Image (cartoon, rainbow, N blue to C red):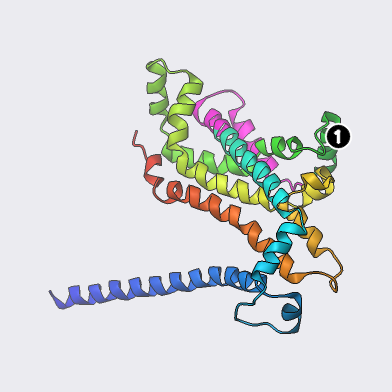
Amino acid sequence: MSKKNTIEANANRSRKIFAYIVLIFLTVLCLVWFYLLFLSATQSTAELTTSFKFTFGSHLVENFKNALNKTDLFRGLLNSVIISGACAILTTYFSTLTAYAIHAYDFRLKGFVFTFILAVMMIPSQVTILGFVDMLEFLGLRENYTGLIVPSIAAPVTFYYIKQYMESALPLSLIEAARIDGSGEFRTFNSIVLPLMKPAIAVQAIFAFVSQWNNFFVPSQIIIEKRELKTVALMIADLRSADFKSMDLGLTNMSIFIAIFPVVVMYLLLSKNIVGGLALGSVKG
């Protein structure tokens, strides 16, 4: 091996080591907050208010039993799973369907429709909230799951991401070949387009699920007031809104820790499609 090759090999090795160090640091930085949360979930209110300890407490089982018996947390988890799961499915499916229509069809107002959707993406939800509430009241969609699930179909950000991914992953020649073979439009979409878009759909499904899971403003102020319909975010907010002197910090931290699990499970279910399925979207025309 020449001296030049030796220098390049050492440089590549150094860059690789540096990259691993940075990745390990970022991983630890991300995981340390989960560790601190679990640490707090094992301690009592007295321990948390007097001094912070980096060792596990002895109140893990007690805090878990309190979360199970003193709150409706698991009812809130079920509500959040239903709402977030339905929103993730509807958001990704209809956003992909809309992106497919813009990508695969030529019509007179195509440019205007695309620009209009992007313009809607720039409008904060707080600006249109009064009209949104009036519409839900008129349609009778308040105080039920439907009022939170159905509006999630309109997701300009999800549409834009999938549309950009579709530009490189879905050649028009493939669609035209399917039409020549006699495939209907919905069959083409469901059988050909959706499998090719699986990586992008998986990413956006996670974003939609987490966004709805953490959604607090709309369910609390606009849609849901009945306790049996409250999501887990509202349940935890009720615990945190109590008088600080009487608030059970161990119970609150345990509730937050439990509420994280469905999001982690959602990521684990879709991570294979995100990492290993990227090649499914690369089709050469």
Q: Residue at x 83, y 33 (%)?
A: 135
Residue 196 appears anywhere in the view:
yes
- Vertical relation: 17 (above or below) 242: below
Nearer-the-camera pick, 248 or 215: 248
Residue 126 appears anywhere in the view:
no
Q: Residue furthest left?
A: 1
Estimate the x, y position of residue 264 in percent, counting from the top left. Answer: 55, 56
Q: Residue at x 62, y 73 (%)?
A: 39
Q: Residue at x 81, y 58 (%)?
A: 238
Quadrant containing the C terminus in the rendered view: top left
Estimate the x, y position of residue 17 in percent, counting from the top left. Answer: 35, 74
Q: Indicate the secondary structure of the residue bearing disc 1.
A: helix
Q: Residue furthest bottom?
A: 51
Say if the magenta span includes residue 29.
no
Q: Quadrant of residue 248?
A: bottom right
Nearer-the-camera pick, 254 or 285: 254
User: Is most of the magenta stretch helix, strand or loop?
Assistant: helix
- Vertical relation: 213 (above or below) 155: below
- The residue that disc 1 covers is 137
Nearer-the-camera pick, 93 or 233: 233
Please state the extent of the stretch shown in magenta in the rendering.
97-126
Mark 1 crowd level (few <14, some 14–19, many ≥20, 10 Å Cα) = some
Estimate the x, y position of residue 100 in percent, counting from the top left. Answer: 52, 31
Left or right for 59, reference 217 = left
Q: Quadrant of residue 148?
A: top right
